[in-house]
Amino acid sequence: MENNDTLLMGVVFENVKPYLNKYIESLNNQSTKNFDLLILNDGFKEDIPDNKINNQIISIINNQTSAQIRQFGINYAIKNNYKIIIFTDTDDYYSQNYVESLMLGLENNDFVYSNIVPVDNNDITINNYFSLPHETKRYEQIIKYNYIGLGCSAVRSEIIRGINIPSDIIAVDWHLYTILLLNGFAGKLVENASVYYRQHYNNTVGGLKPLDRVRLLKGIDIKEKHYRYIYNYCLENNYESVAKEYEIKYQEMLELKLFLQENINLEKYLNTININLNTVYKGWWSEIISVEELNKI
């Protein structure tokens, strides 16, 4: 059977079962059927309901990090000559025109991203804290936080050929789109397509949730790795001035960890962020800020 030009990729993981049928239903109801589906396994131990999926391809992968699994998916798409990769999250669901709209958007753009509509476990829309720019052309737009996720974006596969994702990073999307922007590629918001972004306890990133010590330290670790890897990438590719910016961001995370070793500072940080969360939160990792930024609030 000949492949379509578009590959839609999703990753199943532990605890996704309550949301998986809704995800698959939203794909079955898409306005176009001209796409293939690749489901990658990241620790999901139950049977995937494959009988409900159109154009399915299922690959079970064990004992690899989340980043390695997504690298496998990207490599699979390139190896099998797919022209478009649409990234999805299997605990979310998608508007009926989602696939078709993103495919159309990629006719004139390097990558695209959709509207994000947060919903609760009962599919009720909750406070939409994402304010997405119509265009993303500069790495500076996502240097402090990210808003182009692997649950709400698509890319022309030819432009990510050869990109290597470090195996130990969590923010794969942030890494990928930062590198694309550094190399002169640009993206655009597809305003008429939406991902219904599920808010639940097991979200890797979460959303507009009160910040606690565990999530704070995890966020610092994620940002620290992101900045360090992009800094090294910039040095290797002769982006010296940009490397300096990422070195500063990396140092800010190291300083923040040192600052938070004092319990009084930890309490101050959490209280300040949580009181001002509605204004601080602008995208993924935006609530993890430097000591200098904290003192300005």
Image: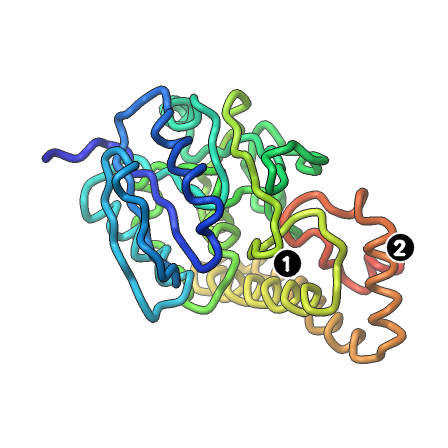
Vertical relation: 242 (above or below) 30: below
Q: Locate residue 290 relative to residue 3 in the image: left or right.
A: right
Residue for point 56% across, 57% down: 204
- The residue drawn where x is 82% and y is 56% is 273
Residue 209 relative to residue 76: left or right: right
- The reply to whether residue 150 is visible in this rendering is no
Whole-percent x, y for residue 262 in the image = 84, 79
Q: Residues within 10 Å of mark 1 (few under 14, many from 20)?
A: some
Q: Which sits earlier in the primary sequence, circle 1 or circle 2?
A: 1
Q: Residue 44 location, x and y as percent? A: 38, 59
Question: Of the residues tagged 1 and 2, which is closer to the observer?
Answer: 2
* Residue 206 appearing in the image: yes
Left or right, residue 4 beside residue 244:
left
Spatial CA distance of label 1 from label 2 is 20 Å
Residue ID at (47%, 55%) = 172
- Quadrant including the N terminus: top left
Relative image position of residue 207 (x, y in whole percent): 66, 48
**In front here: 166 or 127?**
127
Instruction: Give the image location of residue 189, x and y in percent.
Output: 53, 29
The scheme the figure's colours follow is: rainbow
Q: Is residue 108 above or below residue 1?
A: above
Q: Secondary structure at mark 1?
A: helix
Left or right of 62 in this view: 21: right
- Mark 2: which amino acid? Lys
User: Circle 2 sits in a helix, a strand or a loop, which is it?
Assistant: helix
Checking the image for residue 108, the label placed there is none
Residue identifier under label 1: 245
Q: Which residue is mark 2?
A: 296
**Quadrant location of residue 117?**
top right
Instruction: State whether residue 239 is above or below residue 130.
Output: below
